[in-house]
Image (tube, grey):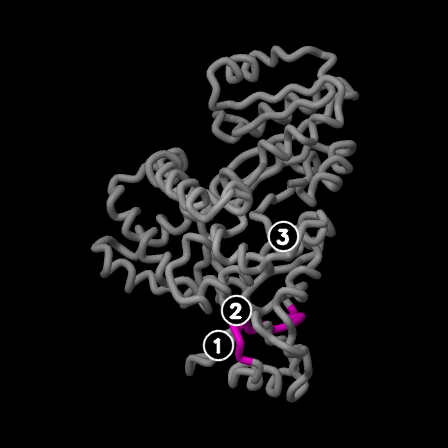
Amino acid sequence: MNRAQKKNILKDLEKKIVLLVGPRQCGKTWLAKDIAQDFHTPVYLNYDQPMDRKIMLEQAWLETTDLLILDELHKMQGWKNYLKGVNDTKPHSMRLLVMGSARLDIFDRLGDSLAGRYFRHRLLPISLAELKQVNQPLDIHKLLERGGFPEAYLAENDVEANRWRLQYINSMLSTDIFEVDKIHNARAMQLVFNLLKSRVGSPISYQSLAEDVAVSPTTIKKYIQILEALFIVFAIQPYSKNIARSLLKEPKIYFFDTGLVQGDDGVIFENMVALSLLKHVYAKVDLQAENYRLHYLRTKDGLEVDFALVRENIIESIIEAKLSESTPTKALKKFHERYGYPAIQLVKALRNEHKQEDINILKAEKFLSDLFL
């Protein structure tokens, strides 16, 4: 299946380095090799492979190379200065595509050495919006059951999708997390991972998790940051005009692989909506340089709205995700009435779209497939 970001990456490669990041096995290598077909003399090198690593360290590719693809480069010590040197001395005809499966913005700030030299693209799992862009059938049920990772989504059957997921989880928890940071208590990390799967969509208390796992809240926070860094989970903070204050409050955790979520159909659907909105936000940031963020709303008395799309620190719309409930929720009505936020209730099973109490009740599949990407 084609990926929607290919045309934008090709365009950006003509101007600067392209940093392509995203979850492991999300299709970055496939996309890079697909992009390579548009070049005459591309070279693909992976830092995890000893022979490729030697070539990378010695910069031993031919000068006629017109596309140089460097995979997992962030594992090289001093990779930023290395990449700056390669970029500043490369032939004018060479394009640079750099890939990684860790969130560089969390664990390795890009810093001044690459300032102004790169465009970032974040490749996330397949979404309804991407399926629409590449002219594939929209199948919300399949996305909910299998998640959007290409190998699982495109598998011949559910059994093959589940076999992929088992291998994926084992790889993440036995290898990947140790490449990001030293984990002295692998069992505790595994327990945190399993507990998060059953707490999707609920505000996370570090103290409560710490008591369940028998470690400190600081350790819990560190483990979640590692899971974030590897694109396994993402956190949505409660909205506050004071950004620093919002970071002190309890986040909600969602998974990049919807298939990992343990909960009822409503929780799985909420995770899919969260991921679709996050992908939309990333596209706004990466492609249009707009200051978009995804938050949720919660009052001290527990009134909560699932999501808030925020632009320039101003709420653009508030969104509830429901399986079949076509009557606006109490929280959605309260926030809409009190603050005038444009309100949307996305419903998976909805016969007719309509407006109720000035709140848009919309079909989830249509809304999510029309998101900017």
The single residue placed furthest to the left in the displayed view is 214
Residue 282, label in figure: 3
**Residue 163 drawn above or below residue 141:** above
- Left or right? Give the position of 334 relative to 164: right
* Residue located beneath label 1 in the image: 304
Secondary structure beneath label 3: helix
**Which quarter of the figure is the N terminus placed in?**
top right
Residue 196: in sight, yes or no?
yes
The reply to whether the C-beta atoms of the residues labelled 3 and 1 are less than 8 Å apart is no
Q: Residue at x 70, y 54 (%)?
A: 132
Q: CA distance from mark 3 to mark 1?
A: 24 Å
Which badge, 2 or 1, comes first in the chain's sequence? 2
Secondary structure beneath label 1: strand
Mark 2 residue type:
Tyr
Mark 1 residue type:
Glu
Which badge, 3 or 1, comes first in the chain's sequence? 3
Residue 82 or residue 1, whichever sits in front: 1
Residue bounds of the magenta highlight: 314-325
**Residue 148 drawn above or below residue 319:** above
